[in-house]
């Protein structure tokens, strides 16, 4: 019997479809690589995540880096991956964003040192089967997975550099970490407790949540239904919103048709591989 192709989705891919179907088409169907692939905010978030991954990788090796070592690592990573094209004409320069990252890291370091919460993995790749045949899967990366020796719970830690703090109701309906908790239970046992923890670095605050087995079962079904709806979709209209300001496809979006926005010499090309 011929095996069907496995369809692998991610939380970001699902969110892209929910936010704007045209963006989804550009990114995941047409596989267009935008001229500028990420914003300076995305660069900031990426380097902060990379630095915290390095920090906890060192901790796992029984070595606690100094605060200065952490900032040196952050600075080198920033320089290696930074491009002047990331800065838009918003009155803020590179130094502004760089310093934001420094402050996030210093606040985090001062709050959580000596980082003794029994970290198991950093950037842990996970896969979740959404159906019995394994035709639809979710792929993701857990920023940090820890096991709390006091509570006996596994903890999924996620870092956020956004300057907006969600209300608790939104946290309780968050899909990404809830899906990741399904993977953790599949790895360590369905009877294990899993706590979801978001670190909002701009505010130096953490938000926590948990899910019941009933909620997780319902989430799997809802996620599978969404994917099947995506698979059936043939129309991909744009959805104009404030999120467009951070969209790399804005220059070619018909909802923002403006000669000043369209590059005179576009360099769009097909992308070979993209989840």
Image (tube, rainbow, N blue to C red):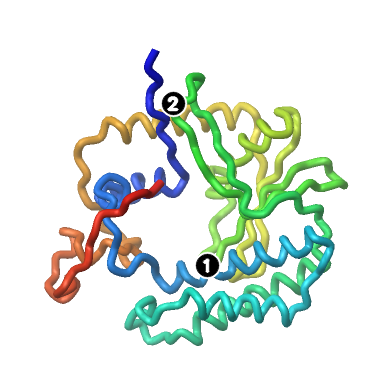
Q: Residue at x 51, y 30 (%)?
A: 220
Q: Quadrant of residue 50?
A: bottom right
Q: Give the residue drawn at x 67%, y 38%.
A: 184
Residue 247 higher or lower than 76, as above or below:
above
Q: Nearer the viewer, mark 2 or mark 1?
A: 2
Q: How crowded is mark 2: few (under 14 residues within 10 Å), some or many (20 or more)?
A: some
Task: Identify the residue at the far right of this view.
Answer: 150
Mark toward the start of the polypeptide (2 vs 1) = 1
What x and y, as percent, mark residue 175? 52, 42
Is residue 10 placed above or below 207 in the rendered structure? above
Residue at 31% x, 32% y is 231
Q: Residue 183 carries which label?
A: none
Separation (CA) of disc 2 from disc 1: 32 Å
User: Pointer 1: what residue?
Assistant: 45
> Residue 199, image x and y in percent?
64, 60
User: Residue beneath label 2, please?
Assistant: 135
Q: Is residue 183 above or below residue 11?
A: above
Residue 73 position by quadrant: bottom right
Is 21 left, or right, of 193 in this rendering? left
Which quadrant holds the N terminus?
top left
Residue 107 as seen in the image, left or right of residue 265: right
Residue 88 place in picture, x, y as percent = 34, 79
């Amino acid at each position: 019997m011929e095996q069907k192709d496995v369809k692998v989705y991610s939380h970001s891919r699902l969110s892209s479809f929910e936010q704007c179907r045209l963006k989804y088409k550009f990114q995941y169907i047409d596989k267009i690589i935008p001229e500028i692939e990420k914003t300076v905010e995305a660069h900031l978030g990426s380097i902060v995540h990379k630095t915290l991954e390095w920090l906890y990788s060192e901790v796992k090796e029984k070595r606690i880096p100094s605060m200065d070592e952490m900032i040196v690592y952050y600075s080198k990573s920033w320089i290696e991956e930074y491009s002047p094209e990331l800065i838009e004409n918003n009155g803020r320069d590179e130094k502004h964003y760089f310093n934001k990252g420094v402050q996030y890291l210093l606040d985090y370091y001062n709050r959580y040192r000596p980082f003794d919460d029994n970290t198991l993995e950093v950037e842990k790749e996970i896969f979740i089967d959404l159906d019995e045949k394994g035709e639809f899967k979710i792929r993701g990366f857990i920023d940090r997975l820890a096991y709390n020796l006091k509570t006996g719970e596994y903890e999924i830690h996620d870092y956020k550099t956004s300057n907006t703090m969600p209300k608790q109701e939104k946290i309780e309906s968050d899909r990404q970490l809830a899906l990741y908790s399904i993977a953790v239970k599949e790895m360590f046992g369905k009877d294990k407790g899993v706590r979801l923890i978001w670190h909002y670095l701009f505010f130096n605050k953490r938000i926590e949540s948990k899910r019941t087995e009933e909620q997780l079962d319902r989430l799997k079904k809802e996620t599978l239904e969404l994917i099947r709806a995506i698979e059936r979709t043939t129309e991909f209209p744009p959805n104009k919103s404030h999120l467009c300001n951070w969209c790399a496809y804005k220059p070619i979006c018909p909802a923002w048709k403006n000669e000043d926005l369209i590059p005179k010499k576009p360099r769009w090309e097909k992308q070979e591989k993209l989840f």
